């Protein structure tokens, strides 16, 4: 009774409920078997509280887009010691700088979602910040889907970062609009040569519409997170 009052902060006549609550939860000496006792109850979290991960991801995502970073700068936001992985302390510092109130336990939970063999690769962490964009015009979405299939076809790229670097022809950590246009036209031409009659056809005007969709912050270039938002999902399904 004292325990229930202390934990729940409720002044209730627990003695009335002891029989039902402790039924089959006592050992031979009359002691409460707490695991068995607690297994009778279920804690439900209100939907607005269960969405904290999505809210945190969205805030970090939007802060990175606003900063308009190249790939190296984006990696350095998280990987302070340049070892290629991110730990709890490093990610906690990021949240602190962005003034996002999260506990250490929440940081650990966020990292657990992308941990592989006990480590969190910094690129995998950035890719986990992918945010679903607003619905696009049907013709643009169809073209994006077909482009995604083209990029993924034939195992052309081993992962999303390699695909991004293929578009980043000058190696500055961003994809300039003219670079995206040039690579798309090159890949489409190769597809038309290799798959006559069943290849992708796409106009320069449609490529420009696609660029406008990808470049979410209208910076004139496409950063890695913008690229991930649009194309990483197709690759993760391969």
Image (cartoon, rainbow, N blue to C red):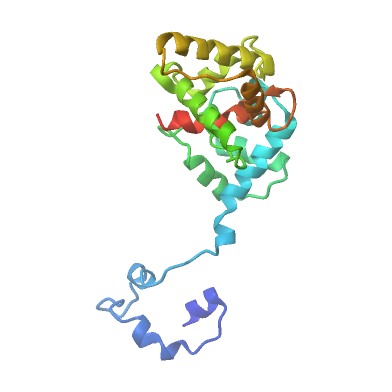
Foreground pick, 86 / 73: 73
**Outermost residue to the left:** 28
Relative side of 3 to 181, left or right: left
Residue 45 position in % (x across, y down): 52, 64
Evaluate whether residue 76 shows in this view: no
**Residue at left offset 54%, top offset 32%:** 127
Relative side of 178 to 13, left or right: right
Q: Choose top left, top right, bottom left or bottom right for residue 88.
A: top right
**Residue at left offset 62%, top offset 24%:** 206
Taking 211 as reference, is 15 above or below it? below
**Residue at left offset 59%, top offset 32%:** 140
Relative side of 31 to 232, left or right: left
Residue 134 position in % (x across, y down): 62, 42
Taking 29 as reference, is 95 above or below it? above
Q: Choose top left, top right, bottom left or bottom right for residue 64.
A: top right
Residue 66 position in % (x across, y down): 74, 34
Taking 207 as reference, is 103 above or below it? below
Evaluate whether residue 38 shows in this view: yes
């Amino acid at each position: 009774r004292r325990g229930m009052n202390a934990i729940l902060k409720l002044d209730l006549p627990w003695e009335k409920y002891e029989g039902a609550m402790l039924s089959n939860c006592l050992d031979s000496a009359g002691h409460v078997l707490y695991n068995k006792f607690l297994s009778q109850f279920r804690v439900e979290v209100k939907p607005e509280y269960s969405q904290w991960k999505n809210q945190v991801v969205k805030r970090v995502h939007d802060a990175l887009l606003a900063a308009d970073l190249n790939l190296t700068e984006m990696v350095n936001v998280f990987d302070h010691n340049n070892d290629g992985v991110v730990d709890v302390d490093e990610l906690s510092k990021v949240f602190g700088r962005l003034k996002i109130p999260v506990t250490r336990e929440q940081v650990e939970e966020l990292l657990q979602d992308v941990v592989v063999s006990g480590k969190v690769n910094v690129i995998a962490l950035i890719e986990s910040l992918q945010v679903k964009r607003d619905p696009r015009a049907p013709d643009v979405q169809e073209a994006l889907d077909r482009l995604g299939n083209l990029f993924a076809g034939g195992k052309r790229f081993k992962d999303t970062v390699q695909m991004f670097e293929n578009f980043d022809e000058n190696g500055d950590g961003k994809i300039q609009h003219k670079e995206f246009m040039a690579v798309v036209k090159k890949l489409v031409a190769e597809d038309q040569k290799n798959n006559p009659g069943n290849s992708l056809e796409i106009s320069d005007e449609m490529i420009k519409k696609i660029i406008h969709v990808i470049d979410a912050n209208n910076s004139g270039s496409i950063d890695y997170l913008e690229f991930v938002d649009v194309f990483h999902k197709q690759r993760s399904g391969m």
